[in-house]
């Protein structure tokens, strides 16, 4: 697990070093993108297969060729800091400081976004949880030729608090794809390392035809297992290929094959599940900033046996066919942004015993109330049911659901200062020790941030 995490870190570092070199290649044309067409003939890669997260930024907030930086200070009160490991929930106040630097660069062939934000979090009562946090990400599209585009994304986070983000307003972005990481099982506060990324290539071989392929990976690691009794490390790897046909300017149809390898690392044991799916998808683009996507098809799962220390009898594996389906939409206006998605598919357990049949739905809404005042609202629901021929006792420790919601209000003072107030509510029903004794979490936060932006090459 540690070597896999190091490999992802090295991959991120290579991309970080290579991006400035690629950006020096000159070629006339518009900046590449998979979300907005730059010419009448260029096709768009459907959100179902692109692997991109929907943006929740308002239309007027999107700018490229900028160097951005700043610092944020956040204070939060949580009524469930350590969960049930001490017999009852423990409330606490935390203080975090986040320096941030980001580079958004566009050249004729490359669009890259690099961001890094180290942080420091301190707890008023539970000082043993004090931690130095890390957040780093890269997102770029490189046009190899007028008809071939390569894309890559990677995001790494080291934190003791899944709610603790340097940019609290963008913590709930949604995706229209089927190969999303399962992040619905949440330990209140525990040391965790998470890494996710994907790469893809798309080739438009005809005016209305496109093919492509991609790969995804995610890793979840708890350095201190005693903080999360009942939860385990996990990882996923996947690959896909697709064909897309543009029926008209607004209508796209296509088919995709997707493979997943889902791993759960138990106490001196493991569980492996492999899935294969053939999906058909349809995407509607009423306008460049509005899209609706749907997908569906059969999914085959080969679930391996489940065994771990303390389990007297290994649980047998199984094979099954199940339907996979989903839908999503994204709207980016000058005053309102909306991203919503639903999916039904076999996914990694996200810390549970093994792979699960997951039904998940989420929505994020942003609204500009006045010139310097905006509000956001996000919510999500996820239900996880164990897959395989495991016993009822094992299934009962895995099946459950979670409901979460966040509301926030932001006020801009001048050009650089921003103040945000927010509230988060989480409810979970999983029968694991870290969650079962304290299934509810309420968190109130206030954040003060100073930011600056400098144009590049202007």
Image (cartoon, grey):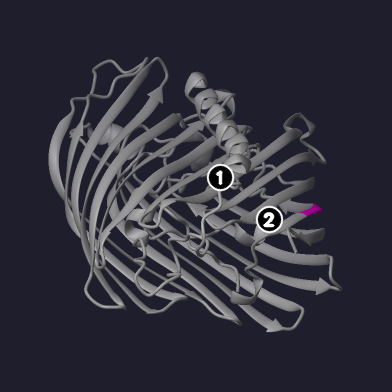
Q: Is residue 429 above or below residue 57?
A: above
- Residue located 56% across and 47% down the image: 25
Give the answer, above or below, for where 337 lies relative to 70: below
Residue 361 in the image, given as x and y percentages of width and height: 39, 62
Q: Position of residue 248 (x, y in %)?
A: 25, 78
- Dominant secondary-structure state across the stretch colored magenta: strand
Give above or below for 327 relative to 335.
above
Label ID, residue 167: 2
Q: Which of 296 and 272 lies nearest the eye of the viewer?
A: 296
Residue 369 falls in image quadrant: bottom right
- 299 left or right, relative to 179: left
Q: Residue at x 62, y 32 (%)?
A: 191
Residue 349 within the magenta-colored segment of the rendering = no
Could you say which is closer to the camera, residue 391 or residue 34?
Answer: 34
Q: Earlier in the sequence, mark 2 or mark 1?
A: 2
Residue 95 seen: no
Q: Position of residue 158 (x, y in %)?
A: 63, 35
Residue range corresponding to the magenta coloring:
69-73
Give left or right: position of 143 versus 378.
Answer: left
- Residue at (67, 60) in percent of width and height: 65
Which of the numbered marks, if any, corresponds to residue 438?
1
Mark toward the viewer: 2 or 1: 2
């Amino acid at each position: 697990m540690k070597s896999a995490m190091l490999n992802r870190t090295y991959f991120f570092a290579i991309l970080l070093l290579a991006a400035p070199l690629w950006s020096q290649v000159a070629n006339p044309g518009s900046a590449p993108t998979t979300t907005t067409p730059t010419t009448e003939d260029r096709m768009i890669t459907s959100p179902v297969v692109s692997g991109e997260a929907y943006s929740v930024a308002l239309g007027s907030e999107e700018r490229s060729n900028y160097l951005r930086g700043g610092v944020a200070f956040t204070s939060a009160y949580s009524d469930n800091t350590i969960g049930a490991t001490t017999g009852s929930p423990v409330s606490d106040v935390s203080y975090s400081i986040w320096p941030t630097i980001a580079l958004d660069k566009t050249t004729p062939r490359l669009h890259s976004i690099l961001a890094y934000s180290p942080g420091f979090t301190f707890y008023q009562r539970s000082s043993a949880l004090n931690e130095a946090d890390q957040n780093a990400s890269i997102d770029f599209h490189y046009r190899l030729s007028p008809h071939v585009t390569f894309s890559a994304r990677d995001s790494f986070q080291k934190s003791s608090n899944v709610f603790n983000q340097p940019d609290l307003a963008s913590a709930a972005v949604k995706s229209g794809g089927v190969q999303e990481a399962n992040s619905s099982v949440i330990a209140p506060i525990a040391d965790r390392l998470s890494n996710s990324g994907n790469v893809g290539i798309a080739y438009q071989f005809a005016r209305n035809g496109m093919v492509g392929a991609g790969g995804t990976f995610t890793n979840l690691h708890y350095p201190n297992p005693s903080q999360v009794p009942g939860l385990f490390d996990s990882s996923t790897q996947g690959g896909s290929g697709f064909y897309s046909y543009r029926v008209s300017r607004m209508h796209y149809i296509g088919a995709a094959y997707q493979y997943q390898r889902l791993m759960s690392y138990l106490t001196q044991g493991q569980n492996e599940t492999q899935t294969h799916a053939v999906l058909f998808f349809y995407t509607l683009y009423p306008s460049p900033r509005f899209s609706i996507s749907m997908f569906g098809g059969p999914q085959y799962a080969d679930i391996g046996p489940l065994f771990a220390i303390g389990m007297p009898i290994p649980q047998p594996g199984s094979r099954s066919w199940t339907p996979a389906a989903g839908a999503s939409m994204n709207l980016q206006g000058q005053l309102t942004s909306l991203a919503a998605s639903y999916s039904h598919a076999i996914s990694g357990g996200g810390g549970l015993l093994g792979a699960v049949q997951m039904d998940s739905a989420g929505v994020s809404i942003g609204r500009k109330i006045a010139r310097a005042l905006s509000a956001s609202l996000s919510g999500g629901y996820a239900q996880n049911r164990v897959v395989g021929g495991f016993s009822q006792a094992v299934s009962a420790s895995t099946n459950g659901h979670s409901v979460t919601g966040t509301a926030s209000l932001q006020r801009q003072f001048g050009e650089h200062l921003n103040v945000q107030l927010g509230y988060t509510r989480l409810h979970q029903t999983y029968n694991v020790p870290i969650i079962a004794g304290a299934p509810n979490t309420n968190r109130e936060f206030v954040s003060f941030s100073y930011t600056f932006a400098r144009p590049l090459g202007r």
